[in-house]
Image: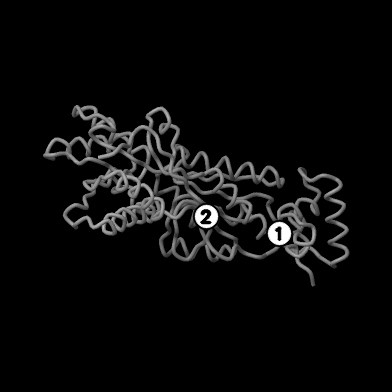
Amino acid sequence: MAGIRDVALAAGVSVATVSRALRGQPHVSEKTRARIQHLADELGYVPSSSASGLRSGRTGALAVVVPAISGWYYGRVIEGVDAELRSSGYDMVLFSLGGRHGERERLFHSSILRKRGDAVLALCMDFSREERAELETLGLPAVIVGGPVRGFRFVGIDERDAARRAVNHLLELGHRDIVYVGGGAEEGRELNPSVGRERRAGYVRAMRAAGVSETGIRAIAGEFSTEVARSRMSELLARADPPPTAVFAASDQMAVGTMLAAAEHGLRVPEDLSVVGIDDHPLATPFGLTTVRQDPYQQGATAARHLLEEIDDGVPLRRSLKLPVELIVRASTAAA
């Protein structure tokens, strides 16, 4: 028996388009809808029970779990998810933990997720053993956005490669005294610690490959915060003689904090200190920050699209997806 992917292949369109066409959803031309329906009939495609949507008791919604509402990355991912869901006639039910442990307990141990969505998309989170068991009992498709989590498929970037690109840019400019500003207190139960770990591993690997000694590999905990990074970098600059010539920060917000600390200590960026980050946060352009750009909007849209296809066809995302990144060179880096 033909499946939805066979129809999509024959029609030369995506699985999501076939799903929308056969469900009578918007954003599909009548000509395309008629062609898809004809091919489906010709191939003998019969929608699965999961594709019957509301008729089989599904909610017609996707449950999205975020650690907090605030934050540039979270907002952009949610926008991407929402755009994809709207185009498929689906709703989004947003659950914000707000950094409160009680909310997390309520969400995972009172079957709220079971009643509110046909699939689960979680942002930047890791799970306890009990939470993993609860998610498994739901029997719902689940995808993580923002860093790999053991036992789950994820959509994000190659964190090590992104860090390697940032550090190699500094190395190619002749820098060897490069300090890493990374995670710390945020790597607890509320957030996925793999992002910070992977970016630090990318930094260490690039430095070792360049022949930098272990004593030359230095890191401080910026906790993915502009203010914490500014404070910790200020402490380092107060005692370092001479100061480092470059900094790789594991996020643009920490990179901005580093630049503020440099200014407080009379150091010019990039003449005295080159700085590079990761994200291409909205602050990166006004600060002239060299960074490795990722696209959280596309990550959210991609994850939502694969979940919708799994709901419709019952065929899960076979592997995690790492979307491309790009080095954006601005005014914060220069030759050593």
- Using the image as rendered, state which of residue 170 and residue 202 is in the foreground: 170
- Using the image as rendered, state which of residue 286 and residue 76 is in the foreground: 286
Task: Indicate the amino acid at tag 2.
Answer: Val
Q: Position of residue 235 (x, y in %)?
A: 17, 37
Q: Which residue is mark 2?
A: 155
Horizontal side of residue 257 vs 236, given as left or right: right
Q: Image height check: is 33 above or below 70?
A: below
Residue appearing at x 61%, y 54% in the figure? 115
Q: Position of residue 282 (x, y in %)?
A: 45, 33
Horizontal side of residue 68 vs 224, given as left or right: right
Q: Position of residue 220 (x, y in %)?
A: 23, 46
Q: Are marks 1 and 2 in contact (CB under 8 Å)?
A: no
The label number, if any, that marks residue 255 in the structure image: none
Task: Indicate the amino acid at tag 1.
Answer: Asp
State the quadrant of the C terminus.
Answer: top left
- Using the image as rendered, state which of residue 177 and residue 85 is in the foreground: 177
Q: Image height check: is 202 above or below 262?
A: below
Q: Image height check: is 112 above or below 6?
A: above
Q: Position of residue 276 (x, y in %)?
A: 34, 40
Q: Which residue is mark 1?
A: 312
Secondary structure beneath dot 1 equals helix
Q: Image height check: is 147 above or below 256?
A: below
Residue appearing at x 57%, y 40% in the figure? 79
- Using the image as rendered, state which of residue 312 and residue 248 is in the foreground: 248
Q: Nearer the viewer, mark 1 or mark 2?
A: 2
